[in-house]
Image (cartoon, helix red, strand yellow):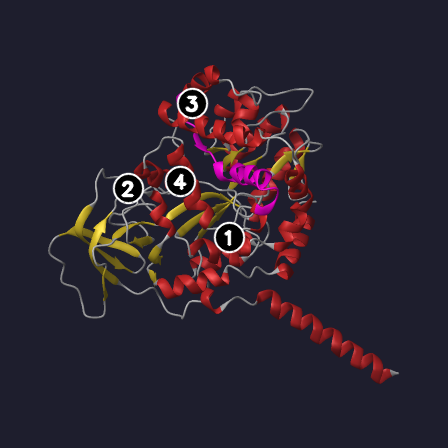
């Protein structure tokens, strides 16, 4: 009998060890080959500086230790022999893309994003693993976009739109305590959800200001008993106001009133608040309705996390059976509202909500840029939204999203001119991330790595998160 229990114990230990190993295993494509970033001279490039009005042919970029050391045209600088020289062959070189609204559940999300030219992301719903993961990326232990993250999503207890990933508050004391707890955990940016009460919202703002934390989020609507005016969100100093869809819901009562749209756009522009439209997430919902669910199984969904898809299955089923065409009409209206905000002078960013609602990583970022063009932006303006504006929203202007001396060496190489058609960014020849060069073969391997999210890791992280926010 003793031998049986010893054998059983060994099996349990081995089984647990196997699960731990599997939970920490990453595809080889996500692991750097060691050492510091190399230095490069990229020559014979057509330079696309988002801050400029035109492309510059016969350009070169010198990269030293992960940062841009020199940008110029004409004669090449003399460089030591150990610097790797790359002939761009006249192709277009531009900064990497910034997606300011994603939901990361697994490292493979990062691989899928980087394989498509997304070099910086802001995760909009922090969990315990996100800050350590960001440090691993910065140390060069794994390949991935630069990762910034908010803390857990703050919402009001009893709010009608809440879910199990939210951190719920009720009243001033609890709201302040939750903000302090997020700060103590290492988070420096807050994500606010729709149904915060007036009291909780005021307390969060005050506590965040005292701690030097920044905020972004949905327009705060208040509670059914005490609704909050839309203007209060514009006065709150949010880094970004999220979702054209949410703006239309709160500010226009979800009514397609064209006469009020111009006034709303001017109101937002006057506040100086940046808007992150996230048009693609509702487009995906509309496509699910239009295709009777076929959109959920499109090829791009191969990288979508199966655990999250399982949680969303009830919603997918609802929209698959939805008999009306109002989602298609509302999508057109959201695009029109976004265009009106742009014409009024509102600064727009590129965010996708990737990771939820049938919105996969990487490919969705360029699709969002295409939707901004549909809204009336030029392709160059859409590129600025995904580079310069994203950097400003993250408080990193002059550090990322730029093609100038001192900027991070996060770069894309593409054959066709994306200022003529932003869709050309779907077809990348190479990506540089933090001074590490990823050619077509490496990008393909990252793309394949992105097809294999770990359900085991995801379940473990959701469990840890649910315990952390209690």
Q: Is mark 1 on a helix, strand or loop?
A: helix
Q: How many marks?
A: 4
Q: How far apart are marks 1 and 3 (CA)?
A: 38 Å
Q: Mark 2 points at which residue?
A: 420
Which residue appears at 57% of the width and 25% of the height? 249
Question: Is label 1 in contact with label 3 (beta carbons under 8 Å)?
Answer: no
Label 1 neighbourhood size at 10 Å, few (<14), some (14-19), many (20+)? some
Q: Mark 3 points at which residue?
A: 271
| 396 vs 285, nearest the viewer | 285
Picture disc at residue 370: 4
Picture disc at residue 300: 1
Q: How far apart are marks 4 and 2 (CA)?
A: 12 Å
User: Considering only order in the chain, which callout, 4 or 1, is on the residue closer to the N terminus?
Assistant: 1
Label 2 neighbourhood size at 10 Å, few (<14), some (14-19), many (20+)? few
Q: Distance between the residues labelled 3 and 4?
A: 26 Å
Was residue 291 drawn as part of the magenta stretch in this picture? Answer: yes
Picture disc at residue 244: none
Q: Can residue 125 be seen in this view?
A: yes
**Of labels 1 and 3, the one closer to you:** 1
| 447 vs 172, nearest the viewer | 447
Q: How far apart are marks 2 and 3 (CA)?
A: 32 Å
Q: Give the range drawn in magenta.
A: 269-294
């Amino acid at each position: 009998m003793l031998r049986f229990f010893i054998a059983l114990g060994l099996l349990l230990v081995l089984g647990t060890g196997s699960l731990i190993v599997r939970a920490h295993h990453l595809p080889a494509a996500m692991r750097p080959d060691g050492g510091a970033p190399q230095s490069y001279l990229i020559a014979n490039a057509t330079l696309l500086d988002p801050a400029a009005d035109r492309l510059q042919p016969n350009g070169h970029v010198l990269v030293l230790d992960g940062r841009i050391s020199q940008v110029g045209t004409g004669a090449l600088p003399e460089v030591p022999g150990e610097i790797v020289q790359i002939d761009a062959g006249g192709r277009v070189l531009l900064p990497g893309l910034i997606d300011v609204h994603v939901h990361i559940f697994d490292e493979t999300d990062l691989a899928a994003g980087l394989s498509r030219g997304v070099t910086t992301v802001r995760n909009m719903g922090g969990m315990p693993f996100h800050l350590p993961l960001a440090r691993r990326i910065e140390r060069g232990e794994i390949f991935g976009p630069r990762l910034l993250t908010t803390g857990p999503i703050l919402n009001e207890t009893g709010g009608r739109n809440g879910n199990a990933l939210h951190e719920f508050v009720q009243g001033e004391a609890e709201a302040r305590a939750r903000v302090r707890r997020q700060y103590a955990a290492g988070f420096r940016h807050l994500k606010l959800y729709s149904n915060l009460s007036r009291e909780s919202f005021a307390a969060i703002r005050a506590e965040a200001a005292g701690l030097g934390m920044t905020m972004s989020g949905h327009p705060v609507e208040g509670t059914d008993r005490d609704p909050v005016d839309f203007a209060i969100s514009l006065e709150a100093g949010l880094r970004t106001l999220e979702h054209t869809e949410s703006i239309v819901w709160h500010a226009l009562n979800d009514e397609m009133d064209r006469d009020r749209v111009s006034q709303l756009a001017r109101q937002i522009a006057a506040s100086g608040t940046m808007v992150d439209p996230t048009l693609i997430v509702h487009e995906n919902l509309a496509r699910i309705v239009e295709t009777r669910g076929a959109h959920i199984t499109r090829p791009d969904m191969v990288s979508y996390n199966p655990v999250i898809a399982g949680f969303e299955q009830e919603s997918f089923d609802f929209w698959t059976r939805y008999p009306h065409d109002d989602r298609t009409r509302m999508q057109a209206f959201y695009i029109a509202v976004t265009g009106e905000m742009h014409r009024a002078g509102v600064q727009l960013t590129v965010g996708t909500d990737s990771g939820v609602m049938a919105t996969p990583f990487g490919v969705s970022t360029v699709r969002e840029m295409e939707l901004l063009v549909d809204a009336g932006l030029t392709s160059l303006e859409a590129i600025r939204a995904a580079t310069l504006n994203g950097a400003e929203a993250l408080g990193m202007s002059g550090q990322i999203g730029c093609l100038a001396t001192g900027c991070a060496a996060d770069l894309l190489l593409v054959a066709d001119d994306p200022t003529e058609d932003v869709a050309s960014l779907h077809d990348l020849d190479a990506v540089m991330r933090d001074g590490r060069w990823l050619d077509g073969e490496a990008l393909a391997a990252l793309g394949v790595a992105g097809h294999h999210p770990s359900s085991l890791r995801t379940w473990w992280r959701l469990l840890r998160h649910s315990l952390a926010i209690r």
